[in-house]
Image (cartoon, grey):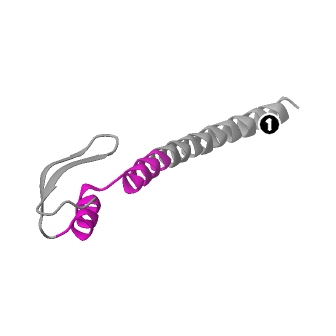
Amino acid sequence: MSCGWIAQRDTLRAEIISAKQEAGGVQALAQRIETQQKLLMALSARQNALSPLRVLDELTQVIPLDSWVFQFGMFGGVSILAAMRRAQPI
């Protein structure tokens, strides 16, 4: 009779060890998912940010050929200091 409860105890211990190992795997997977989500958010923010190259490309399309850009800045917005031969709004 005493052997029955010992067998149950050993079975429960084995199940606890197995459950702890599985929980460790789940925690590691949750950590990987969290890391991947942070990377995805960072990449998404970077992709949605104004690209200086895109702004300069658009600028070359908009500013007339007889114009000169003296200053160009992108700090929370775009600022341009330019001059042209003929007076015309940009």
What residue is shown at x 34% (from left), y 53% (from top)? Answer: 50
The extreme front residue here reads 87
**Direction from residue 50 to residue 57 in the image, left or right:** left
Residue carrying label 1 = 8
Is 45 covered by the magenta stretch? Answer: yes
Residue 59 spot, x, y in % from top left: 25, 62
**Residue 90's x, y, as percent?**
27, 59
Q: Nearer the viewer, residue 11 or 24?
A: 24
Does residue 4 appear to the left or right of 89 in the view shown? right
Q: Residue at x 81, y 33 (%)?
A: 3
Q: Which of the 4 image quadrants contains residue 27?
A: top right
- Taking 84 as reference, is 43 left or right? right
User: What secondary structure is the magenta-colored segment mainly?
Assistant: helix
Q: Work out whether 27 lies above or below 39.
A: above
Magenta stretch? 36-64
> Is residue 65 located in the magenta-colored stretch of the structure?
no
Q: Residue at x 44, y 54 (%)?
A: 44
- Of residues 42 and 14, the one drawn nearer to the viewer in this rendering: 42
Q: Compared to 9, does 60 lie above or below? A: below
Residue type at the position of mark 1: Gln
State whether residue 24 is above or below residue 36: above
